[in-house]
Amino acid sequence: MSVKLLGHFHLYPPSHNAGAEWMAHSMLRYLSAAGIKVKVITNRPPRRRGTFEGIPVEMVSNPARASLDYRWADVAMTHLDVTRQSMKLARRLNVPLVHVIHNHQQLEYHRVAPEDAALVVWNSRWVADRAGAGWDGDSMIVLPPVPVSRFESIVPAADGAVTLLNLAEAKGAHLFYELARRMPDVPFLGVRGSYGEQVEPPDLPNLEVIPNQPDVRKVYARTRVLLMPSTYESFGRCAVEAAAAGIPSIGSDAAGLVEAGCNWQNLPLDIEQRPAINGFARSSALGSRRTADLWHGTLRELYGDPRTWYTASLAAYDRALELEATTNRQLAELALRIEGLAR
């Protein structure tokens, strides 16, 4: 008999397109293909009842109704905003609960104890090292899965844009806009994010801003270089997606981006300009002029020299293949662990 796995999340693609939700979806698709029976419930609008890429998804806002789904499940999986509700239901109905961890403060913030987590899944080595130092429960690492086959058919255009996904301050929107000002001969493409207050763009002839995209492949098809000047990333999923399409990235020295290893060059942000807010780094309106100068020079070199871009493109694609092989091994282990929890 197939193991039944319930995913309980606050939101889910394609109505909510953030890295955590796409990681959860990618994991569930793998587990479903491995023979585990999967379904997802969410607790926030939009109201929905159907399937997304083979995964049944339904919005269930009534806790009593959610209890029925937990009674159906052999194992449940949760993360982020719905964590405490999920813990209560799993504890009351004696369902083993898997927590997917997307930042180093998540367990502490939601007051998760080892008895509330049959398994913790860290999304990167550095998060495991940082958050797992005092964790006594069972855990493993699964990097955010990025199937190369989903992106490798994209052909980056020679005149494609310099792109930023999510125009929030902490994602580097102000630096992105400054670079667009400095490079009027280069197209810049900004994509509004699914979360975080979006920094409104300046009026620049070479800058286009578009809404959040359910299918990010349409964005990569217009992209020549991806920018990720983030002050915090637990892992660089966007850089890996771009790499799978042969698109090089220029990223900050945030730990998750460095670990992903898909960036052509990790550049520092001005540490003095990003004071810690609740343990997370926050950027200033721009950062120092030295920082902007450094990013400008690096971007000009990568975008403007075809040979440099081609070398970076090949290296990025190779890294995406390497990460896919690693993640597939981790997902196979996760499937075995979930099957073990159901016994």
Image (cartoon, rainbow, N blue to C red):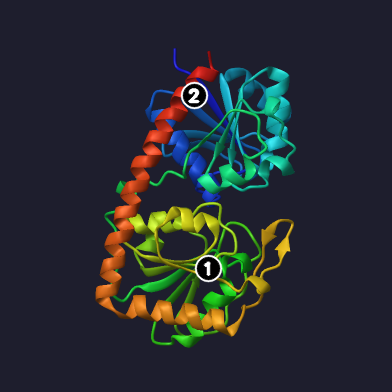
User: Where does residue 137 sit, x and y in percent of width and height?
Assistant: 63, 28
Judge from the rendering whether residue 102 lies leftward or rightward of residue 134; answer left or right. Answer: left
What numbered label is drawn on residue 73?
none
Image position of 121 with respect to 280: above or below: above
Q: Residue at x 50, y 83 (%)?
A: 293
Amino acid at dot 2 = Arg
Estimate how packed mark 1 is, as few (under 14), some (14 to 19) or many (20 or more) residues with alpha carbons within 10 Å: many
Residue identified by numbered label 2: 337
Between 169 and 258, the one nearer to me in the picture: 258
Q: Nearer the viewer, residue 139 or 204?
A: 139
The earlier-in-sequence mark between 1 and 2 is 1
Residue 143, horizontal then vertical, whole percent:
46, 43
Q: Residues within 10 Å of mark 2 (few under 14, many from 20)?
A: some
Residue that numbered label 1 is attached to:
229
Q: Quadrant of the N terminus?
A: top left
Q: Secondary structure at mark 1?
A: loop
Distance between the alpha carbons at the discs numbered 1 and 2: 36 Å
Which residue is at a point 58% across and 46% down the rendered structure image?
Answer: 127
Q: Is residue 324 above or below residue 137?
A: below
Q: Is residue 50 above or below residue 207?
A: above
